[in-house]
Image (tube, rainbow, N blue to C red):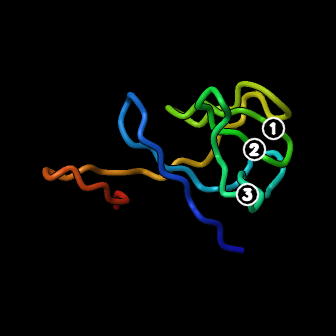
């Protein structure tokens, strides 16, 4: 099964993660298109686990210690974001 990715701009720069909850093995947005909590953290809409945008680690909910699968990015000289090789 293929999953999409989410792309965020954080204080630490752009971050991308596979749109898949490590606990529930479902898309984080569960078809809603919503990824962020009111506080700006990444939130699984299926069971409400919270993940830090800067590093994808779960800090609240059913999967503490787990992390989202990061997708490495590069920013070119013009500010364009690319998936790193």
Q: CA distance from mark 1 to mark 3?
A: 13 Å
Q: CA distance from mark 1 to mark 2?
A: 5 Å
Residue 7 sits above or below residue 4 on the image: above
Residues packed near mark 3 inside 10 Å, few (<14), some (14 to 19) or many (20 plus): few
Q: Earlier in the sequence, mark 1 or mark 3?
A: 3
Residue occupying image coordinates x 56% and y 59%: 5
| Position in image of residue 50 (x %, y %) | 72, 32
Residue identifier under label 3 = 32
Front residue of 33/42: it is: 33
Q: Earlier in the sequence, mark 2 or mark 3?
A: 3
Helix or strand or loop: what does disc 3 sit on? loop
**Circles 1 and 2 in contact, beta carbons < 8 Å:** yes
Which quadrant of the structure image shows residue 12?
Answer: top left
Residue identifier under label 1 = 48
Residue occupying image coordinates x 49% and y 32%: 54
Residue identifier under label 2 = 44
Which of discs 2 and 3 lies nearer the camera? The answer is 3
Residue 22 sits above or below residue 42 on the image: below
Helix or strand or loop: what does disc 2 sit on? loop
Residue occupying image coordinates x 72% and y 36%: 66
Which quadrant of the structure image shows residue 58?
Answer: top right
Which quadrant of the structure image shows residue 3?
Answer: bottom right
| Position in image of residue 41 (x %, y %) | 62, 32
């Amino acid at each position: 099964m293929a999953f999409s990715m989410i792309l965020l701009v954080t204080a630490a720069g752009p971050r991308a993660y596979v749109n898949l909850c490590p606990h529930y093995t479902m898309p984080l947005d569960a078809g809603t298109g919503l990824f962020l909590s009111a506080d700006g953290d990444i939130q699984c809409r299926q069971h409400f686990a919270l993940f830090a945008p800067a590093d994808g680690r779960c800090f609240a909910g059913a999967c503490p210690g787990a992390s989202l699968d990061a997708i490495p990015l590069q920013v070119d000289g013009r500010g364009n974001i690319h998936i790193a090789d």
